[in-house]
Image (spheres, grey):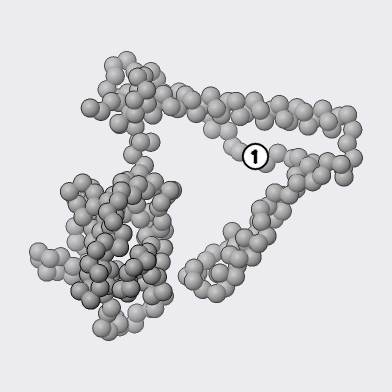
Amino acid sequence: MYFSNSLIPNKPKKTEYNDSPSKREDNPNVIFKPSHYFVTATLTKPASDASVQAALADFRARGGTIQNVCRCSSKTNDDEVKLSVREEIKKLEVEIEEKKRRENLKKFYFTEEGKIDALHPFNHQRISVLFSSFSQSFHFNSTFCVTPSVLTMDFYGRNDINLGAFLERYCFNSTYKCLSAICTAPFLHHVRKFVHGSGCIEILLRQMESSLDEMDSTTIYMWSWCKLCRQVSPVVPMSSDTWTFSFAKYLEFRFQESKINRR
């Protein structure tokens, strides 16, 4: 049995909220350091590149951009103290309003009986799949390396990863090892399965006998092959938008979209 506020007659109207632009208020006790160049730079090289790794390490080593200033080192007077108190009161009022706003939003996520609203988009921003991994080589143990278990992924959030990052880290990385301590098979001989509803996606790795003409070793190329019509789609490089696409969202499209056709 599913419930939704959309099915209730004379449901309460949706509350309108005015989005106030966030601003960085001047505070004499806080200094904001300039943003690190790693945040603003345009990355044109893969994450495994030495220069990218060095920039990332420097970014992590420098810490955050907010630097607190000791109040005892600055001259203060009664007016400044009063101003600081008013700022604290204002921040507290903003936090209270934000808490009220979140409580009001819960009315749309849940029904009046406290049950989850099955038709609210907020409750459909994740996907649960049955994940498993095993070695397909007869020279090694045929048991599961990763026993079938439910994996819940929030779109662009918890347990999710970019589609391109998943391929580079878990498919094209020759140094990646099996998670099982008793498995000695190369990861090239493994099969990974994602099951959702009546659908199943298998990930198989194969070593190409010869590379494609004019193939860039730093670029991921894609094509598809239909088992029914035996037709092959054109070979195209993966775009940056596809690389940054949510892997969880990709699985949802593959499982639930029935109108995906060959190019």
Q: Amino acid at mark 1?
A: Lys
Question: Considering only vertical position in the picture, is 80 above or below 49?
Answer: above
Q: Position of residue 199 (x, y in %)?
A: 19, 52
Q: Which residue is mark 1?
A: 23
Where is residue 254 drawn, in percent x and y? 25, 53
Residue positioned most to the top: 10
Q: Quadrant of residue 244?
A: bottom left
| Residue 223 visible to the viewer | no
Q: Residue at x 38, y 70 (%)?
A: 177
> How packed is label 1: few (under 14 Cα within 10 Å), some, or many (20 or more)?
few
Q: Residue furthest front?
A: 182
Q: Nearer the viewer, residue 65 or 195?
A: 195
* Total count of labels: 1
Q: Is residue 149 left or right of residue 44?
A: left
Does residue 97 show up?
Answer: yes
Asked if residue 69 lies left or right of residue 133, the reply is right
* Image quadrant where one finds the N terminus: top left
Q: Is residue 32 left or right of residue 246?
A: right
**Residue sitting at 66 percent across and 53 percent down?**
64
Q: Of 228 and 195, which appears nearest the observer?
A: 195
Q: Position of residue 230 (x, y in %)?
A: 11, 69
Q: Is residue 79 left or right of residue 244?
A: right
- The residue positioned farthest toward the left in the image shown: 228
Q: Position of residue 161 (x, y in %)?
A: 41, 56
The residue that appears at 39% across and 78% down in the rendered structure is: 217
Give me the residue at 78% from left, 42% from top: 29
* Quadrant where the image shows the C terminus: bottom left
Identify the element where label 1 is drawn.
Answer: loop
